[in-house]
Amino acid sequence: MTSFDTVVVGAGVTGLTAAHRLVEGGQDVLVLEARDRVGGRLRTETHHDSDFEIGGQWVSPDQSALIGLLDELGLETYPRYREGESLYVDREGVAHRFVGEELPVAERTGKEIDRLVGLLDDLAAQMDPDRPWEHPQAAELDRVTFGQWLEQQCDDEEARDNIALYVGPAMLTKPVWSFSALQAVLMAASAGSFTHLVDADFILDKRVVGGLASVPEELARRLGDRVRLRADVQRIEWDPADPDAGATVTVAGEQVRARRVVLAVPPTLVQRIRIVPELPAEHRHAREHQSFGLVIKVQVEYAMPFWRDLGLSGTGFGPYQLVHEVYDNTLHRAEKGTLVGFVSDVNADAMGRLDEDERRARILASVASYFGEQALSPVTYVESDWQHQELTGGAYATSFDVGSLTRYGAKLHEPVGPIEFGSSDIAGHGFQHVDGAVRIGQRLADRILGR
Ligand code: FDA
C-alpha cells in the first residue's frame, strides 16, 4: 500500500492551498479529487468563444490572503467596470438612476438604512470572525432570525428589505427567516464591516485575468502528479487506539495510507464519506445543521455593452426583482458586453420548477426592468447550475440554521484523530469566499507542520 505524509481530499482552493504549503514544508502529499477537474466551486466555461466564470470570480481589497496568493502565482487582476450611474428598481418596477452608495429612496427610508448599517457595523466590530460564538451578544443574536431582528430594529419596510437583500439573497443566498442575526453579523465581520458588504465597489472590486479558476489550476500545475482526478474518496479508516498510526483512505477500490488526512470538502459533503469509526455525534450534528444556500448566477452577453452608452455602470439593485442585483461583467479587453445577475433563495426555487425557455424569458424580463428592451436580445445566455452537482449541492456556500452557530460552530474546526476538516465555509475572515479557503488551507497545513 502506498504511504504519504498527508492525503488531501478535494482539489478546491482549500485543499490545493493546504497541499501546496505542505509540499513546501517538505511533505510527501497526495491530493484526491472526485471530479475530472480541479477548482471545485471555481470554474470557467467557454460559450460562443467567450469565457464565463460560473463560480466565484471577484476579489475585494481586504482579501489579503488571496491577494498574496495571486501575487505568488503571478496572476493579474483588473477592475470591474463601474463608470456611470447605477440603477435602483423600486417596488412598482420603476428604474431610478443614482450615483454613489445612497439608494434613491424616500429620505426617511435612506436615514433608516444608514442607521441599520451603523447598528450592524457596531455589532460586527465586536466580533472576532474566527470565534463568532464569543460575541458579547452571541446567544441572543443566534436565537432570532435576521428577518426578526430587522423587524425589532426598524418599522420602515423598504429600509429593512434593502438591508435584508445585502445579507440574504446577495450573500448567504437564503431567506432572512432561515438564518440567525449572529450569522448575518459574521458575514459582515468576515468582510471587515457591514459598510463593506453594502459597498459593491469594495466587495466586487476586481477580477483575475483568465478567471479566478486560474488559482486552483496554477496550484495544481505546481503540484503536478501529486493531484489525482476522478478519485472520489469513499472511506477513511483510522484506529482510535493508535491515532499516530494515521489513516487508510479508500478510493476507487484502492487503498492509500497517510499520517494525516485533510478533508477539504464542504461540511455538507463529509457525510458522503464513510468514516470508521463514525465521527463523534457532535461532529455529525454540527454538519447536519449546515446547509447550502441557493443562487442562480446568470450571465448575459450582448454584441456590445449598450448600457455604457446610456451612461450606466451596469450596476443595479432591486429588492423586489427576480434578479435582485446586476453588474457589468464584461471580460478584460472584450468588445462584447456582459451583464451578470443573481436569482436567489425562494426565487431560485421557483425558477428551478420552470422549463429552460420559460425561466430564461422570466429572468431576461427582470434584467430588462433595469436596462430596458435591449436587454431582451442577448447573443449568449449562461446559467450556473451548482445545485444539480452532487459534489457541490448549492451556491455560494453553506451556513448554519438558527441557533447552531453558537451551539456547533467551534466543532467544525476540531480535528478527529488524524483527520483535519477545511472549507471556505468554516473560515472567519473570508467566510464563504476564496480568501477564506486560502486562509483555512494555510492554517491546516501550518497545524500539520507544527508551525
Ligand atoms: P470547493 O467546494 O470549491 O472544493 C471542494 C472539492 O472537494 C471539490 O472539487 C469537490 O469535487 C471535492 N470533493 C468533494 N467530495 C469529495 C470526495 N469524496 N472525494 C474527493 N473529492 C471530493 N467566492 C469569492 O471569493 N468571490 C466570488 O465572487 C464568489 N462567487 C461565487 C459564485 C458562485 C456561483 C459560487 C458557487 C461560489 C462563489 N464564491 C465566491 C465562493 C467560492 O467559490 C468558494 O468559497 C470556494 O471556491 C470554496 O473552495 P473550497 O476549496 O473550500 O471548496
Image (cartoon, grey):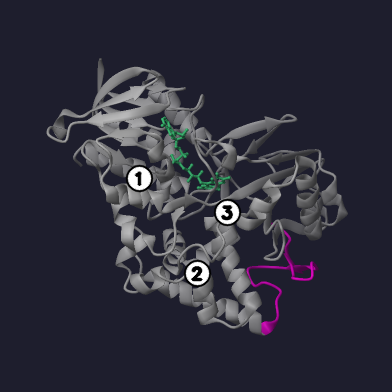
Category of crowding for the residue at label 1, using alpha-carbon neighbours closer than 10 angstroms: few (below 14), some (14–19), many (at least 20): many
Please tell me which residue is depicted at 56% across the width and 35% down the height of the picture: 43
Magenta segment range? 82-107
Q: Amino acid at mark 2?
A: Phe
Q: Amino acid at mark 1?
A: Ile
- Which corner quadrant holds the N terminus? top left
Please tell me which residue is depicted at 70% across the width and 44% down the height of the picture: 299
Can you tell me whether the CB of the residue at mark 3 lies under 8 Å from the nearest atom of ligand 1? yes
**Mark 1 or mark 3, which is nearer the start of the sequence?**
3
Can you tell me whether the CB of the residue at mark 1 lies under 8 Å from the nearest atom of ligand 1? yes
Category of crowding for the residue at label 3, using alpha-carbon neighbours closer than 10 angstroms: few (below 14), some (14–19), many (at least 20): some
**Residue 441's spot in the image, x, y percent?**
35, 41
Is residue 294 left or right of 215 when viewed as pictured?
A: right
Verify whether residue 83 appears in magenta: yes
In this rendered view, identify the residue nearer to me: 119 or 254. 254
Could you say which disc has been placed on residue 50 in the image?
A: none
Could you say which disc has been placed on residue 440 in the image?
A: 1
**Mark 2 or mark 3, which is nearer the start of the sequence?**
2
| Residue receiving disc 3 | 204
Category of crowding for the residue at label 2, using alpha-carbon neighbours closer than 10 angstroms: few (below 14), some (14–19), many (at least 20): many
Q: Amino acid at mark 3?
A: Leu
